[in-house]
Every structure is written in structure tokens, then in C-alpha cells.
Image: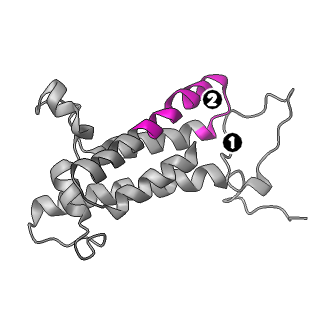
Amino acid sequence: MLGPAPSLLRGWFSPWAPQTGPGDVGSTWGSPGWMWLMPCLADLVLSLYALHVKAACARDLYYLALCDVGTISCSRIFSRWGRGFWLVEHVLGKGSILNQSNSIFGCIFYTLHMLLGCLRTLWASVLLLLISPVSLPDSIYLAWMLFFVLYDFCIICITTYAINMSLM
């Protein structure tokens, strides 16, 4: 049996998370559990790193990212092709406010996923069920573009797609 959790850790680790029954309204804020939190955090970190690589490449043309190994170049993908899911520019124009880096959309998406996973309300559950399936066709589309249009490979991109699949 586990002892009491330190006050900093209480509520975030599933063994110490408060258990609510079907009739217990309880708190509206709870632990999403490690199986939900870790993939979201991993994707958030990968999105932040991709944003960093994109900014560093814009400042320094000779920047070498950690994910640039041999002929595999994540920085080339992020700097040239990583905006608006390769669609927004063609549909809404290059100057559209929605033509942002895919990494920004990823940061927003995974932060929203983590927050909604912590909320214990009906509307949060419904919203999470509505936005979760968005990542699957998006990952398939971006992987298809990466492999069959650009004929390239990106370690960060592929890892993100795999983690997206695990969130389903």
C-alpha cells in the first residue's frame, strides 16, 4: 500500500489521485493519469523544440539542429514547409493569420489536450472527444506529404505522428 503523497505531488500521480464514484460530483479538476499526460507532454516538448529549430534557422543559416543527422534534416522541413499544414497559404493566402508554424498549432493543441484531460466536466469530455480525432487525419496527411511529396524524413515529425496515434 502506498503511503500519503507529498503535498506537491498529490493529485498528479494516479495512485494518489482522488477517486470519485458515479454519484460523487467531487472536484472539477483532477489527474489525467500518466498514460494521458506523458504523450501530451512529449508532443508539447517536441512542438516547442520544432519552434525553436525554426527560429534558430531563421537567425542562422548554418544552424545545425539535434535532429539533423546525416541526410535527414528536420530543420529543412521546419523552416521551409512547416507552415499552415501546407494548405492555409494556398487557401487563405500567405498573409493570413492562420498561416502560422505547425509547431504553434501543436503547442496550442497539446496544451488544450492536457487542460481538458484534467477537467472533470461533461463539456470538457465532449470537447476532448471532438478535438482528439483531429490529430489522426492530420498526422496521416502530414506523413503522406513528408514521404510522398517531399521525399524526406524528419525524426521529430515521425515521433509526433506516432505519439498522436497513441493518444487515440
In the rendered structure, the answer to whether residue 147 lies left or right of residue 2 reads left
Please give the name of the residue rendered at 43% of the width and 40% of the height, measured from the top-left corner: 109
Q: Is residue 27 left or right of residue 110?
A: right
Q: Position of residue 149 (x, y in %)?
A: 23, 48
93 versus 54 height, above or below: above
Residue 114 sits in quarter: top right
Q: Mark 1 — residue?
A: 30
Q: Are marks 2 and 1 in contact (CB under 8 Å)?
A: no
What residue is drawn where x is 18% and y is 60%? 76
Asked if residue 102 is among those painted magenta in the image, a careful observer would answer no
In primary-sequence order, the first of circles 2 and 1 is: 1
Quadrant where the N terminus is found in the figure: bottom right
Q: Residue furthest right?
A: 1
Q: Which secondary structure lies at badge 2?
A: helix
Q: Is residue 118 above or below residue 127?
A: below
Within the image, what quadrant is residue 138 found in?
A: top left
Q: Secondary structure at mark 1?
A: loop
Membership of 121 in magenta stretch: yes
Q: How many marks?
A: 2
